[in-house]
Every structure is written in C-alpha cells, then in structure tokens.
Amino acid sequence: MQRFEIPSLRRGCRVRRLVVPVLVLALTGSLLWCQEVSDLRGDQAIELYDSGSYAEARGLLEQLDAEGALDGALLYRLSYCRRVAGDAAGEQDALTRAIAALEKEHAAARDLETPFYLGNAYRNARRLADARTVAAGATTRVESGELPAPEHPMDMFRLAKLYADQGKEQPAIEWYRKSIEGLEGTDGGYPANVAWARRYIAQAAWSRADFAAAAEQLEALAGAADATVDDLDRLAGARARLGQWSAAVAAWQRAEKADPADANRARYCWRLAAMAEKLPALPERAPSGKPWGSLSKEELETLMAEQAGLVKDAVGSVTSGAAGVDRDALQGKIDAAKPVFVRAGVEYAVRRYPIRETAFLGGYAPLIFHETRWQLPAAD
C-alpha cells in the first residue's frame, strides 16, 4: 500500500496522521482506498497563532484536542488562545494539561521548544521557581554544547526568553536582537514575537536611562499597523526624556486618536509637551536643587500645586481691585512658575502617574489646557 507524506510547514510542529481516503493502484491492478496523509491542521494552527490570529487558531486546536491529537506545545497554545478570548476556565484546563504533557516530554527534549513552552506554562501557573529552573537547565545545555546554538530565528527568540526568565538581561537582549533580524526577514508571520522582543529591549534600555535606544525600539513598534496605545505612550515618554517635544506631542496625539474613548491621559500629556516646546528652557533641577528624577510622586504633586497656587494668588491680586498692584512683578512671578510647573508635570506624566486625575482634583487642569491662564487678566 502506498504511503503519502506531506512535510510539516513549520519547524517544530509535530504532525499527527489523519485517516483520509486516497485512491491508489495496487499491484493486482485493482483500485484500493488507502489512507495516511499527514494532518496539516496543526501546522495551520501554528501559522495562525504565530500571526496573532488567535480565534482562528483556537478553532483548529479545539478540533485536534477533541481527537486527543495535541502535544504539550499545542496544548499551551490552546491555553493562550482561550486566555485571549477571556475563557478563564478553558485556559486553566488546557494549561493544566499542557504542563502535564510538557513535563513528560521535557526529559527527552532535544530542542528548545519543550523547555520554552514548559517555562511559559509554569509562569502562567505562577510557578516562577519552576520556570527559572527549566530555563536555567535549557540555557546550560546550549552553553555546554549539549544542544546546538539556535539557527532558526524562532529558536533564537526562545533562547532569549529562557535567558530573560532567569533575569539574565544581556544574553537575552543579544538573542532577542538576532531573532528580530531573522523573524522580520520571514514572511511577516511572527508579529507577536517581534513585538515582545522589541518591548523587552526597550524596557531594558529605559531602565538604564538609555532613552535613545528605547526610542529606537518603540519607534519600530509604533510603525506597525497594530501598534498599541501603550507602545505610543512609551514612545512619547522616551522622546520627552530626550527633549524631542514636537515628536513627543505627535506620539501622544496618535495615542489619543487610537483610543478616543479613553484618551484623557494622552490628551493631558501632549498638551504638557506642547507647553514645554514653546518655553525657552526648562529648569535642569527642581527649586530645591534636587534632580528631577530623584523627586517622589508626592514631591512632584506638591510642586505643581505650589506653582498653580502662585498663579492663582497673582490673578487674585489683580481681580480683587486692590490698589497699588504691580502687574509687571506679578506677571514675572507667573512666568517664573510656568517652567517649573511644566517640568514637574512632564516628569509626573512620563512616569505614568495619573496626571489627568491629579490635575483635575488639584484644580489646575485649566493651566494645562488654556495658555491664557498664564496671563494676568486685562486691566479695566
């Protein structure tokens, strides 16, 4: 009987043969129905999963699961698809079964796929110590030569994630960079992996105050069709740190348009950045002499409130009708308060504190939205 074998479309996929009729000619000359063509639904599910089409991937994975055809890696993918769909009970069921299957497969694993998914499954189950142990074992095997160094970009991504799971930032960054280059050179079927890698590199750069490096990765994320509001917000923050005010305004305005129903934060942020752009300079240090980065959330809130109070008092001196008011001196106080207020507000916003709520409750939101509030009212 003739056997028909169709190779797996994606590296690392385990194909289960499905019985389907195929017409062949036997030696006797009679026609027989033979079966044994590879079931490609697993490959198709992985392609859909890698491209971020989780609902479609779930449909195929559910079919295969009903037939008992999912290995540990595919069960993990099913658990994630259910998570994206908001099916908490279904996610937990698939995750529990994925862990059990992956634990059995792990001892004989000869590549990075199994430890990668087992580590991810442990993390999702909040078994962080187990995840670190699996990750350390896998990277040690690569470093010792027991497992070959990755050549496929997806395996490069997996190795990077295994290093990241141990808190080993430098090798994680190196392998994430290699994976990005390889994955972006494919047919574009790995957007979620590329985005994950870029976000990791950006966050690492941000944590060491390398805002230019962070912005480089965030700009690439923002250039994608599926850029998130969070990506745009972080990009704007990096540009603000670099003093690129017009670029920061543009990124926050994109974030505002991307989610109009929840755009208050972006709206406040871009207006503060626009104010910063118009000022001749911003103070390098807080009035106390402390670096801006050393100020606490409460200290920043106090500074904004104090500057707003100075403006209110100056305006009140004019509107009260008191005699002998020195308008030039009062306007000078307002002009001196403005860059301090803006710098404190930008610092507060970039740290992702609740700028809209704080400004609203503090009563100084109008100072962010109306430039005229920084001028004394016209004399009668």
Image (cartoon, rainbow, N blue to C red):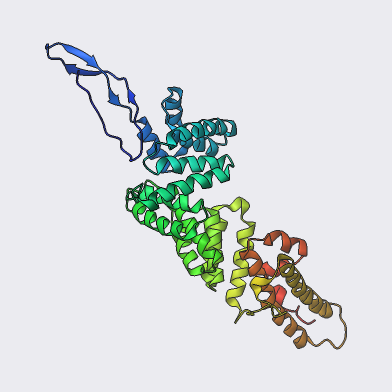
Left or right: residue 5 compared with residue 299: left
Q: Which residue is drawn at 79% across and 77% down?
A: 315
Please determine whether, in this image, residue 94 is positioned above or below residue 184: above
Left or right: residue 214 compared with residue 21: right
The residue lying toward the viewer, choosing from 153 and 137, is 137
Please determine whether, in this image, residue 59 is positioned above or below residue 21: below
Give coordinates of residue 13: x percent, y percent: 36, 36
Residue 279: in sight, yes or no?
Answer: yes
| Residue 64 sits in quarter | top left
Give coordinates of residue 269: x percent, y percent: 62, 64
Please determine whether, in this image, residue 13 is positioned above or below residue 353: above
Q: Quadrant of the C terminus?
A: bottom right
Q: Residue at x 43, y 50 (%)?
A: 139
**Numbered marks: total:** 0
Residue 253: in sight, yes or no?
Answer: no
| Residue 287 sits in quarter | bottom right
| Residue 51 sits in quarter | top left
Q: Quadrant of the N terminus?
A: top left
Give coordinates of residue 69: x percent, y percent: 41, 26
Please determine whether, in this image, residue 373 is positioned above or below residue 34: below
The residue lying toward the viewer, choosing from 328 and 82, is 82
Q: Residue at x 45, y 48 (%)?
A: 192
Q: Residue at x 65, y 76 (%)?
A: 291
Give coordinates of residue 16: x percent, y percent: 35, 27
